[in-house]
Image (cartoon, rainbow, N blue to C red):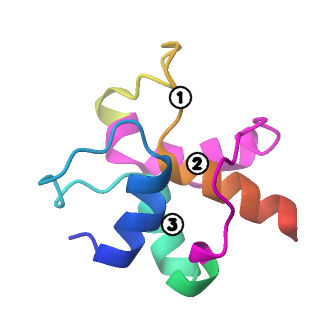
Amino acid sequence: MKEERLTGVICRRYCEYYKEGRENLLCGTYVYLARRYPVQELERAPDGIVPDFSEDAYILEKICRGCEFFIDGCGFREGSPGPPCGGYYLVEWLRKQS
């Protein structure tokens, strides 16, 4: 189940796929971020992050391969023109900060 503050930062702020009322659906990046970062740190991320996909190999191996959406058919990973999930933006941004 999603936590309200995390959902606000990860999903509402960055994810084009997010829909209210589907709080039982967790993407792999949401789970990754929730387990590794306090919400206060995630809230400090700037608006308007644009991924450059420089961390894609890491995100694919460490996060996406275990994501239910990847297993069931992730449009982004299948080559659809749409963006990645919202957590992708944050994971990439955080990795580039260290």
* Residue underneath mark 3: 32
Say if residue 14 shows up in the picture: yes
> Is 69 situated left or right of 32 in this image?
left
- Callout 2 environment at 10 Å: few (<14), some (14 to 19), or many (20+)? many
Residue at 56% across, 86% down:
40
Q: On residue 83, which mark appears?
A: 1
**Which residue is found at the position 48% from the left and 13% from the top?**
80
Q: Tell which tag, 3 or 1, sits nearer the viewer.
A: 1
Kind of residue at badge 2: Tyr
Q: Secondary structure at mark 2?
A: helix
Location of the C terminus by quadrant is bottom right
Nearer to us in this view, 87 or 36:
87
Mark 3 vs mark 1: which is more N-terminal?
3
Q: Is residue 46 magenta?
A: yes
Rendered view: 80 above or below 19: above
Spot occupied by residue 22 in the image (x, y as percentages of width and height): 15, 52
Amino acid type at circle 1 is Pro
Q: Position of residue 15 (x, y in %)?
A: 44, 44
Q: Position of residue 71 (x, y in %)?
A: 35, 36
**Residue 88, which numbered label?**
2
Looking at the rendered image, the quarter that the N terminus falls into is: bottom left
Helix, strand or loop status at disc 3: helix
Q: Secondary structure at mark 1?
A: loop
Frontmost residue, 77 versus 90:
90
Disc 3 residue type?
Answer: Tyr
Counting residues from the start of the chain, the first of labels 3 and 2 encountered is: 3
Disc 1 to disc 2: CB gap under 8 Å: yes
Instruction: Tell me how far mark 3 sits from mark 1, CA to CA.
Output: 19 Å
**Where are the magenta residues, as a range?**
42-70
C-alpha distance separating marks 1 and 2: 9 Å
Q: Nearer the viewer, mark 3 or mark 2?
A: 2
